[in-house]
Each structure stands twice: as C-alpha cells, then as structure tokens.
Amino acid sequence: IFCFVCPINTVRQTMAVGFKKPKTFKSMLQGLTCEKHKIGHLTQQARADLAYQETLAEVDVNAITSYIVNKNADDRLPGIYLVDSICQNVGGKYVPLFEEHIFPLIETSYRYGSKPTRQSLCKILNIWKARKIFPIHILRDLYKAIRELANHPPPPQPQPPQPQPPQMRGAPPPYESSYDTHAAAAYN
C-alpha cells in the first residue's frame, strides 16, 4: 500500500508519465529526526493518507510503532514526537489506533531511557494529559509505571533485533543469541 502526499489524480498522472514510484509511509520514516519540518511532513502525509483512504491510517500506525519498537530507548523520541504530532494535529482515527500501543511504547522507552529521554517523555505525557489526547486510564497507568521506575537508574538497553540473512536450504538453523529483549517483549 502506498501513501500519497498529493491528490490521487495528480499521482495517477505522475505515474502515467513515468516519474518515481510513490514511497510507502514506512520508507518515509527512514532518517526521521526530531527536526520540526521532518515531523511536520510526515504529519501532513498521515493527514493525506486518512483523507485518501481510512485504512491507510492503520498502515501508518503499524509502520510508526514498528519503527519505534526497533529503536533503542534514547533513539525513540523522533517516532514518539511523530505520534504526538499526528494525534494532536490530525486526530480522528489515529488516536484510537495509537491507544493500544502507547503504554508499551512509552513505558519501555522510559524504563530503558536516559535521564534526558525520561524528562522528554514526562513532558509529552503532561501535554497529553492537559489536552486530553488519550483516555485518562491509559495516562494514569503510564504515570503509575513511571513512578515505580523513577527511582531506579535505567538498566542497560537491549539491542533491537538485527535482520537475519536468508537461510540456505539444507543449512543448519542460525545461532539464536540470548540478548535481553525486554523492550520488544513488553511491546508484544
């Protein structure tokens, strides 16, 4: 499924003339930083996707949550800022779609995050609470989890899973490492 920034008629004309193939939302996340213009561009894309076809919102949410989960806690802030931007500026179907992912994303990011990451997450939660972005029961559970973690230094961060090379037919199964996957396990 492709995400379109421009209206569908323009996309069809562009595709008919042989220009570049439209990018997926997932591919657009590569190189995401905390820069306002990058987050703003992806927020506009999410708005366009929702306007074009509501089912694209679910594809976008899955791409964003997958992107965040596969990052170390201190590298998750750009993705979390994107969630914040989409929920505040686009809203609609996105908020309920993100609801089921918010607790594990924020809790594991806080659990393994450095002090500056933890502070940024608390600021985001305070904004969500003040603006009533997410239901109060989700935020209450997050605040409770954060209070329990606040007095503990972050444990070493588990490394996100690395892509495995394709296995050759008849080859023995690849060695499974025993690295700690708390963040991924908490998300699933």
Image (cartoon, rainbow, N blue to C red):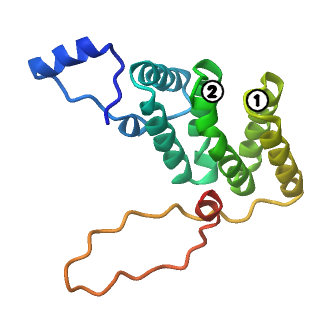
**What crowding class fits label 1: few (fewer than 14 Cα within 10 Å), some (14-19), or many (20 or more)?**
some
Q: Quadrant of the N terminus?
A: top left
Q: Which mark is residue 87?
A: 2
In this view of the protein, can residue 27 be seen by the observer? Answer: yes
Give left or right: position of 71 versus 156: left
Identity of the residue drawn at 58% across and 37% down: 97
- The span from disc 1 to disc 2 (Cα, nearest Å) is 9 Å
Residue at image mark 1? 128
Q: Which mark is residue 152?
A: none
Percent coordinates x, y for residue 21 in the rendering: 21, 29
Above/below status of 16 relative to 93: above
Above/below status of 133 relative to 144: above
Give left or right: position of 17 versus 161: left
In this view of the protein, can residue 80 be seen by the observer? Answer: no
Residue that lies at the very extreme toward the front in this rendered image: 54
Residue that lies at the very extreme toward the left in this rendered image: 17
